[in-house]
Image: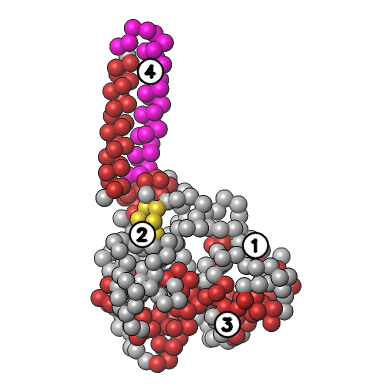
Amino acid sequence: MPNIVGLIALVIIAALLVWMGACALRAQSRALKWGGVGLAAVLTVAVSSIGALTAAGLVKQHGRSAPLPNLTVELVPERIARGKAVVDSFCSGCHGTALTGGGNLAKDLPINIGSFVAANLTPAETLKQWSDSEIFRAIRNGIDANGGWLVIMSFTSASRLSDDDTAAVIAYLRSIPAAGAPTPGRPDRFNLLGLAMLGAGLLPDAKPVTAASIAAPPKGPTAQYGEYLLSYQDCRECHGKDLSGGVPGQLPPLGPDLGIVGQWTLGEFITTMRSGIDPNGHQLGEQMPWRPIGRMDDDELAAMYQYLTQSVRP
């Protein structure tokens, strides 16, 4: 609603500028007349452009949709245990170790484009009223139970979790007790600047909507499994598409070249992910989600190490 009010205000301002330009035409002074008309025209174009981009952003904000799969998840111990492992090493990075949410997911962005709050994933939130299919769609395609766009979810690589791991996450969320307070209002709210940037195509693209089935390779300390882990861990958002370092100007924080891992032993890599301190004594930045990644078991961290050392060249 505040953005609709802001858009209406932009339209009113544009109309007032047109009126001021018309008034300037009646001025006796030639300099005042054409100076006023020129200034009003420039400002009208600027305000109208911002309004048009904001309107385009509003349309885009409500334009995402995805099919609802037919899914019922069986709550078996093995699936719940796997779900806990995925949640601890991935979901907790945004939603907190207790999954009670509340953190501002946009705090590390260089531009204030709105408020994006991590939702409470425990039964204290409305998630308990969602079907398994609706939770699956939220993880895979960033669409909530009401058909609304979960912006930050769609920007992440959560859509690359396998079908089995996504079902495991659902099973684990069904098994935990309620904690914390419900998330107030809608978790994702663009401000006017965010909507204008969205309309102008200046924000990262949401991951494409997909109904395809995703299977993970066999779990083990292999480069193949490490590639799968890295595919959903959002490493490429900061470290670049080929993990050789972020590019200046990108919206997420700049990550360094991960080819440096090739200079470390497996033990040093695991210690770095568990302690946040690399072999050179450098403290990893707080923007780097080393804490959740460090909760992976030794085989998973070894798999990531194998992929990084075999596939990424410094």
Instruction: Give the Cα distance between marks 3 and 4.
Output: 67 Å
Residue 146 x, y percent position in the rendering: 26, 65
Residue bearing the label numbered 2 = 188
- For image coordinates 25% across by 76% down, the residue present is 129
Q: Is residue 275 above or below residue 102?
A: below
Query: Quick one: SS at disc 3?
Result: helix
Residue 311 position within the rendered picture, expressed as x and y whole percent measured from the top left: 66, 72
- Is residue 212 left or right of 182 when viewed as pictured? right
Which circle's residue, 1 or 2, is located before the other in the chain?
2
Q: Quadrant of residue 300?
A: bottom right
Circle 4 sits on which residue? 36
Q: Nearer the viewer, residue 137 or 144?
A: 144
Kind of element beneath mark 1: loop
Q: Earlier in the sequence, mark 1 or mark 4?
A: 4
Query: Which of the colour schemes (rainbow, by chain, secondary structure, one colour) is used?
Result: secondary structure
Residue receiving disc 3: 300
Q: Which residue is mark 1?
A: 256
Residue 308 drawn in magenta: no
Cα gap from disc 4 to disc 2, whole angstroms? 41 Å
Residue 205: quarter of image:
bottom left
Q: CA distance from mark 1 to mark 2?
A: 29 Å
Point out the stretch of residues depicted in magenta. Answer: 26-55
| Quadrant of the snapshot with the C terminus | bottom right
